Amino acid sequence: MGKINIAIAGVGNCASALLQGIEMYKEMSDDPIGLMHYDLGGYKPGDINVVAAFDIDKRKVGRKLKDALLAQPNCAKMFYDNLPDYPVEVKMGPVLDGVSEKMDEYDDEYKFIAADEEPCDVVQVLKESGADLLISYLPVGSEEAVRFYAQACLDAGVGFINAMPVFIASDETWANKFKEKNIPIIGDDVKSQVGATIVHRTLTKLFENRGVALDRTYQLNFGGNTDFLNMLNQNRLKSKKKSKTQAVQAELNTPLDEHNIHIGPSDYIPWLEDNKIAYIRMEGRGFGHVPLTLEVKLSVQDSPNSAGVIIDAVRCMKLALDRKIGGLLTSISAYTMKSPPVQYTDTESKKMVEEFIEGRRER
């Protein structure tokens, strides 16, 4: 089937986990554990090839990709340490709104430190690298920066996967731009393999299916990576909270009043590093209107949890490119993202993705 050439914007923990996984599953070709699909439409994990990378941190810009993946403030769990010497140098991207001022309150080992360099010509790098698509792993709240990379993909003619909560794929104006140029787009805001959102959605659907009225619910999350440090700035959280909340509300026939649902990042604890902990509480009424309460604690390594989903989004986008399908990829967006343009249940979206992979569904 050939290679899938990817570019990455944001060489952080999520990029580290994704590339570790690609290399591990390439070597362990008979081990599908941890993958939703080992063979996806003829493409396997080892077919994914990184050809370009962008970042703004002075400890990463100008360095070989392998070295940048191991540089501070990255703290992703190293579950596979035999990474190759990728022939890729991390290029300086535009800073724009990619660094929160809240970072200044913390030591260098935890925060982003912007390099004092001029940004590269991202469009030119994408074209010269031969990238098929770009994955946006930029920090929460980087509204301007994500739009910059989305436009760069349009100008370079490469697909765009928006793994973070800025509304691009779910914005009609942007979606139309990709449709007009016949360039595929997947988004917005990656839904982890078994993360707080997918667990909360599943439990919400369980209440709905079993006739239990959900009266109120919360989801509190905290962790120790730069994503959680960045989200201490409440001004950057509007899109993130909206994305997570509407993902859960979508499983209800009648959405909860905003006063009865609270979902969002809560705090930053440095020593947790890439470990994310989520607490979910659901209060409802069952038979006879008798009260029912459910509480769940979830502890996961945040970045591999994300990579387990993105690895399928990448391969589905390559299928779309092979089939010359542009614009919004509805099925894989609904399956892998918290805020797709159209919300489907997880069961429905999984079926849609299987139909797309088999060629029985266009997008």
Image (cartoon, rainbow, N blue to C red):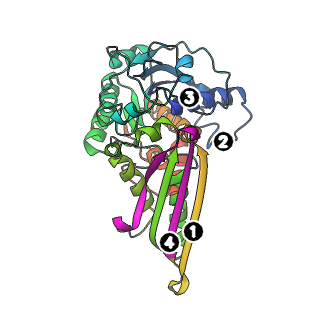
Q: Earlier in the sequence, mark 3 or mark 1?
A: 3
Q: In the rendered view, would you say 183 is above or below 253?
A: above
- What amino acid is found at the position of numbered circle 4 in the picture? Glu
Give SS at disc 1.
Answer: strand
Q: Does residue 129 appear left or right of residue 303 in this picture?
A: left
Majority SS type along the magenta span: strand
Give SS at disc 4.
Answer: strand
**Which residue occupies the extreme right position in the image?**
30
Around disc 3, counting alpha carbons within 10 Å, would you say few (fewer than 14), some (14 to 19), or many (20 or more)?
Answer: many
Q: Nearer the viewer, residue 8 or 170?
A: 8
| Image position, residue 220 (x, y; %) | 48, 55
* Cα–Cα gap, marks 3 and 1: 35 Å
The image quadrant where one finds the N terminus is top right
Which numbered circle lies on residue 234? none
Which span is picked out in magenta?
258-284
For label 3, the residue is: 16
For label 2, the residue is: 34
Labelled pair 2, 4 in contact (Cβ < 8 Å): no
Which numbered circle lies on residue 283? 4
Which numbered circle lies on residue 294? 1
* Cα–Cα gap, marks 1 and 2: 27 Å
